[in-house]
Image: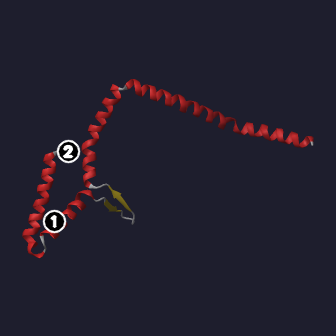
């Protein structure tokens, strides 16, 4: 759910920035150019990924400020909703987990046996091959 007050405050902030620039250098540019400048500044400030340069020449990308803000705000709520959903559908999750464990456990056991006996089976195969070669 979007907070209408926050959106309205963001718009008023954008208008305030536009008004301040217009008061300072308004006669140097048209209203359209000023609006484009403010829109670009707002986009860069809130929606452009941030590049952080490290001391040794590398750099890393950080998510945009707005995305970070939304993530922080929603992470607790999403975690709470997920826990509630899992609790109300515990039987379904138990069945899914059991089926998954049954399948993966059987595969893991088969792989373990294969790994454990791979050398021995190779030696048996090699011995049979050598016996057949010696009979010729």
Q: Residue furthest top?
A: 91
Q: Residue under label 2, please give it.
A: 2
Q: Please state, as top left, top right, bottom left or bottom right, where the C terminus lies in the image.
A: top right
- Which SS class for mark 2? loop
Kindly identify the residue that appears in the image at 15 percent across and 46 percent down. 4
When asked about the image quadrant of residue 16, the answer is: bottom left
Residue at far left of view: 23
Give the mark nearer the N terminus: 2 vs 1: 2
Look at mark 1 in the image and give the residue it sits on: 35
Give the distance between the C-alpha atoms of the residues marked 2 and 1, in whole angstroms. 25 Å
**Up/down of 136 relative to 108, above or below:** below
Image coords of residue 1 (percent x, y): 21, 41
Residue at image position (37%, 59%) is 60
| Residue 36 placement, left or right of 27 | right
Q: How many marks?
A: 2
The structure residue drawn at horizontal position 9% and vertical position 65%, both measured from the top left corner, is 20
- In which quarter of the view is residue 128 placed? top right
Residue at the (74%, 37%) spot, across then down: 121
């Amino acid at each position: 759910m979007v907070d209408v007050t926050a959106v309205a405050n963001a718009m008023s902030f954008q208008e305030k920035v536009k008004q301040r620039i217009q008061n300072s250098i308004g006669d140097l540019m048209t209203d359209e150019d000023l609006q484009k400048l403010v829109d670009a500044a707002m986009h860069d400030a809130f929606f452009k990924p941030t590049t952080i340069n490290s001391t040794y020449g590398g750099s890393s990308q950080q998510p945009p400020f707005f995305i970070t803000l939304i993530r922080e705000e929603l992470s607790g709520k999403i975690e709470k909703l997920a826990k509630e959903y899992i609790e109300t559908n515990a039987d379904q999750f138990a069945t899914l987990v059991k089926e998954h464990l049954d399948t993966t456990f059987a595969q893991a056991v088969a792989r373990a046996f294969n790994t454990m006996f791979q050398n021995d089976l190779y030696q048996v195969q090699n011995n049979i091959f050598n016996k057949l070669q010696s009979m010729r």
